[in-house]
Amino acid sequence: MRHLLVIGALLGCAGSLTAQEGPGDRRGRIDEQRPDTPVVNAGSAWLIGVTTYSRGDYQPSGVDLGFGVRTDGLPMNGVSFGVRLGSFVQNQAVLIGRTQGFFVAAAGGVRRHLLDLVALGNEDNLSYLKLEFVLEGAAAVNFNNPMPQGSFGGIVAPLLGLTFGGRGVFDTGFSIVFGPAYFVGDASEWHTQVGIRVITPRRRRPAP
């Protein structure tokens, strides 16, 4: 019940808070940016990172590769989808611990800006430390899985994200996400998820 209350509170915050606009927003279209300038208010981006979990004798840890798209006019600011590849690490000892089996997962998520914590730089080129709400889900095929979920499993994770970078949801940035993760399969249980994401906007090619 406590976990459900936490999820409900996070969803309530995500639905009630409105993204703040600042002088560094520069809401021009991505295809109007000069080739030698940073992309601002990007319409799409690549997301590369790692994800791991705590608690239990083994934890899945993997590498993420995803693609995100800005969603103007919707309750969320962006959606993403991609793949996660990894193995099951014993007792979180990533460097010296034993691993067993591996997994392949399809992952997706939605992201909403909550508030700007800090703005740095000059008025025409600001960088932001932002607080975001991120809801992620994954469906995995597991091989030689030492965890109780078995050969097929899923994960739902309501997360908070700290992102440093441009004002837009998919502008160049570096993000750390963390929060509870609910595992389902042959058995269900709670873990804590921590992830690191590097956001790289996809620049459109100029029209010929």
Image: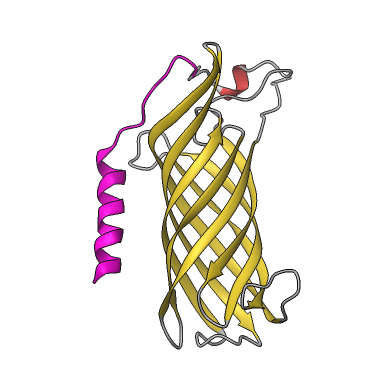
Where, quadrant-wise, is the N terminus in this rendering? bottom left
Identify the image's colour scheme: rainbow, by chain, secondary structure or one colour.
Answer: secondary structure
Describe residue 95's horizontal placement relative to residue 166 as left or right.
right
Where, quadrant-wise, is the C terminus in this rendering? top right
The relative height of residue 170 versus residue 128 in the rendered view (above or below) is below
User: Principal SS element in the magenta part?
Assistant: helix
The quarter holding residue 186 reads bottom left
Residue shown at 42% from the left, 32% from the top: 117
The quarter holding residue 190 reads bottom left
Q: Residue extending furthest top?
A: 123
Q: Position of residue 12 (x, y in %)?
A: 25, 49
Describe residue 122's horizontal placement relative to residue 130 as left or right.
right
Describe residue 17's horizontal placement relative to residue 140 as left or right.
left
Residue shown at 67% from the left, 67% from the top: 85
Residue 6 painted magenta: yes
Residue shown at 68% from the left, 18% from the top: 37
Q: Position of residue 29 (x, y in %)?
A: 54, 21
Residue 165 painted magenta: no
The relative height of residue 127 versus residue 108 in the rendered view (above or below) is above
Nearest the viewer among 168 and 6 is: 6
Q: How many marks?
A: 0
The quarter holding residue 125 reads top right
Describe residue 176's horizontal placement relative to residue 16 as left or right.
right
Q: Position of residue 69 (x, y in %)?
A: 52, 41
Q: What residue span does the magenta drawing correspond to?
A: 1-24
The relative height of residue 148 versus residue 48 in the rendered view (above or below) is below
Q: Position of residue 6 (x, y in %)?
A: 29, 60
Nearest the viewer among 125 and 120 is: 120
Residue shown at 76% from the left, 74% from the top: 96
